[in-house]
Image (cartoon, rainbow, N blue to C red):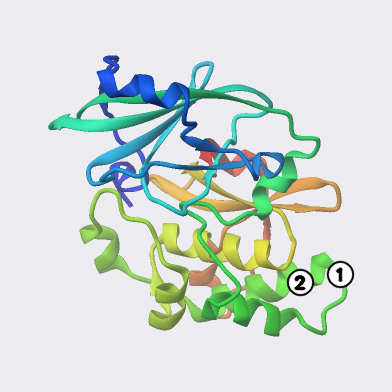
Amino acid sequence: MSRRHMRISTIVIFFILLISTTSFAKNTIVDVKNLDKGIISINYNKNTDNMKVLITKGNNKEHYNLKSGVNYPLQFGNGEYTISILKHVNGNQYKIVATEKVNLKLKDEKQLYLQSTEIVNWNEDMLAIKKAKDLTKNVKNNQEKVKVIYDYVTKNIKYDDKKANTVETGYIPSIDETLKSQSGICYDYSVLTAAMLRSIDIPTKLVMGYKNDIEKYHAWNEVYLDGKWINLDTTYDSAYVQKDVPINMIKSNSEYKIEKNY
């Protein structure tokens, strides 16, 4: 699918602090109660329409739509992060209305990739999560659990070419919609896979970038197994699995170029 549809967009930021920003010095905007898991949320009691959260660490940055009750990942490793609230001005231009710093000191980075976040959004009541737990309830080890979820997704979710050509910028998958429709694009496959695996305590990344034999921007997963991260590409493999063509579940790092992970 198009690169611009998968969380990749350019925004121009005016580094102008509004007068109202001074009030945030007393009232923190960043909720850090889950910082030990690598995630934050935002306390912002004003209208959040057309507002974004900008998370930066060094040269790394990521922006998200501002929503209440949503967890945002700090995926750039330990250290100091700057969290900014952006208000839309015009076109792709935004201005900073509040900013705050947090210091991440994760003992285990894998904790982040077990959480529900703005993109990989899940909870115990979702159909996809209930399905993951039901599929693996009698499975004893993580290797077998990953294979069970992989088999389910690759056998049951069909690639939607029409959606790939019409999906709007800023689209974020719903795992239950993907499950119900039994179809999706690479973004849908990888978010569903990540959520299902995270819900059964297997650290899983949503990864974006390029595959060596796919021209368009792509999404897949990295899953932590046997002490290392392995590549899992349920989108790519579904075309083979659904035609009963054998294919290796674990992919080589040489096949992929990672640009982002969530």
Pick the residue in front: 125 or 28: 28
Q: Is residue 172 above or below residue 199?
A: above
Q: Residue at x 81, y 35 (%)?
A: 107
* Quarter-of-image position of residue 241: bottom right
User: Can residue 211 be seen in the rendering of this structure?
Assistant: no
* Quarter-of-image position of residue 247: bottom right
Q: Residue at x 47, y 76 (%)?
A: 157
* Quarter-of-image position of residue 256: top right
Residue, disc 1: 141
Query: Answer yes or no: do the residues labelled 1 and 2 have beta carbons within 8 Å?
Result: yes
Q: Residue at x 21, y 60 (%)?
A: 166
Q: Is residue 38 left or right of residue 2?
A: right
Q: CA distance from mark 1 to mark 2?
A: 6 Å
Pick the residue in front: 215 or 207: 207
Q: Secondary structure at mark 2?
A: helix
Q: Residue at x 25, y 58 (%)?
A: 167
For the C terminus, the image quarter is top right
User: Can residue 55 be seen in the rendering of this structure?
Assistant: yes
**Residue type at numbered disc 2:** Lys
Pick the residue in front: 10 or 239: 10
Pick the residue in front: 252 or 208: 208
Q: Is residue 117 left or right of residue 95?
A: right
Q: Is residue 226 left or right of residue 252?
A: right
Q: Secondary structure at mark 1?
A: loop
Q: Is residue 18 above or below residue 240?
A: above
Dot 1 alpha-carbon crowd within 10 angstroms: few under 14, some 14 to 19, many 20 or more: few
Residue, disc 2: 145
Give the x, y percent position of residue 187: 43, 57
**Residue type at numbered disc 1:** Asn
Q: Which mark is residue 212?
A: none
